[in-house]
Image (tube, grey):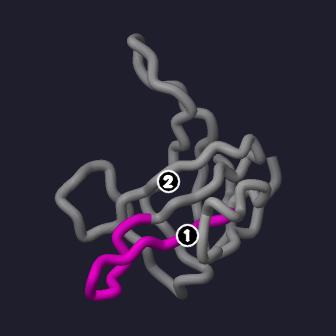
Amino acid sequence: MADLPATLVDDIDEAVDLPGAFEILRDAEGRPTDMLYICPCGCGHTGTLRLRPCDERPSWDMRGPIDRPTLTPSVHHILQRTTGGERTHWHGWLTAGVWRPC
């Protein structure tokens, strides 16, 4: 799978056909709290990443411009959870606004 540019959108529900699209949710003071995204593989599934600082785990550090963010650690998009554990559907990095698979 090739690298894919991430696209900042105002409403993730209107970007279901745009793999790698993301929306930033903010708290009452305007601070980023969560990132909603569409899986970069093109399957159309969505995910949510909690942004630090937060007390919940897992959570991600977000740096850089809001339209070209870098997240750490890597993103494991979990497609399903089973009684035997989790199955990673897509695993990679969001670096400088580009999704890069591992």
Q: Residue 74 carries which label?
A: 2
Q: Name the residue under label 1.
A: 23
Question: Marks 1 and 2, Cα distance to the nearest angstrom?
Answer: 18 Å
Q: In this view, does 26 lie above or below 90?
A: below
Secondary structure beneath dot 2 equals loop
Give 67 or 25, whichever is nearer the viewer. Answer: 25
Magenta stretch holds residue 44: no
Secondary structure beneath dot 1 equals strand
Looking at the picture, how far across and down is residue 77, in whole percent? Answer: 55, 42
Answer with the quarter of the image where residue 59 lies: bottom left
**Kind of residue sitting beneath label 2:** Ser
Sequence order check: which comes first, mark 1 or mark 2? 1
Residue 44 shown left or right of residue 58 in the figure: right
Magenta stretch holds residue 23: yes
**Kind of residue sitting beneath label 1:** Glu
Q: Is residue 15 above or below residue 43?
A: below
First to last magenta residue range: 21-34
Q: Specify few, some or many for label 2: CA neighbours under 10 Å numbering under 14, 14-19, or 20 or more.
A: some
